Image (cartoon, grey):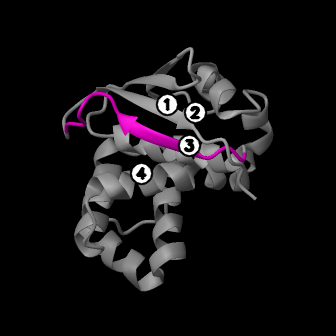
Amino acid sequence: MYGLVNKAVEQLVKVNFGDDKWQEIAKKAGVDQTFIMMKPYPDQVTFDLVAAASEVLDTPSKDILEAFGEHWIQFTVDEGYGKTMSLYGNSVLEFLQNMDSLHAQIRLSFPELRPPKISCEQNPNGQLVVCYQSERAGLAPMLVGLVRGLGKRFSTPVELEYLVSAEADSTSEKFLVTFSQRQVA
């Protein structure tokens, strides 16, 4: 994964738990470097950071990944990708439907990017079935947080549930997204 991802993990930890906790997590993960955002790193670096954060913060990896997914939306906006994101949708539904196209665009700057495939189907009752497929096992909880982050970005509260039980080694998941009628202030 690119350094941008690892920088976002670092920022998530520092903002919520402080520099000391980040140093402890980085040490436990064997990370002794500053991440360069546009540089690819082995996936294992990111997995080691999540595992170390889970242990140090006494929080399940699934919860760390969900928090990271939610954080990722605002992080990417703050890093200058907000305008690009705006081109791919003005609602949670539009954005999710266009996520594969967004990833194709991003690959121009990040040629080694290996994003997941996302597909959506809207039910007649307005709920959304989101299918997630990735070559990397265990990252589906990140999508849950990402959808929550999109809900905040577009002032549309969302609720998610796994339609297929999340397995730690799964590369394919389905989620049901329900949109709340109340708006976020």
Disc 1 versus disc 4: distance between alpha carbons? 21 Å
Three-letter code for the amino acid on which mark 3 is drawn = Val
Which residue position is annotated with label 2?
A: 110
Residue 165 lies left or right of residue 159; in this view the side is: left
As displayed, is residue 152 above or below residue 167?
below
The magenta stretch spans residue 131 = no
Disc 2 versus disc 3: distance between alpha carbons? 30 Å
**Residue at 28% over, 56% down:** 61
**Residue at 55% over, 27% down:** 111
Does label 2 or label 4 sit earlier along the sequence? 4
Disc 2 versus disc 4: distance between alpha carbons? 23 Å
> Chief secondary structure of the magenta span?
loop
Residue 24's x, y, as percent? Answer: 32, 78
Q: Determine whether label 2 and label 1 are within 8 Å by CB.
A: yes
The secondary element bearing badge 2 is classed as loop
Q: Quadrant of residue 33 in the image? A: bottom left
Does label 3 or label 1 sit earlier along the sequence? 1
- The circle drawn on residue 158 is 3
Disc 3 versus disc 1: distance between alpha carbons? 28 Å
- The circle drawn on residue 66 is 4
The magenta span reads: 155-167
Q: Which one is in front in this view, the residue at disc 2 or the one at disc 4? A: 4
Q: Which one is in front in this view, the residue at disc 1 or the one at disc 4? A: 4
Three-letter code for the amino acid on which mark 4 is drawn = Glu
Residue 146's x, y, as percent? Answer: 52, 43
The secondary element bearing badge 4 is classed as helix
Which residue position is annotated with label 1?
A: 113
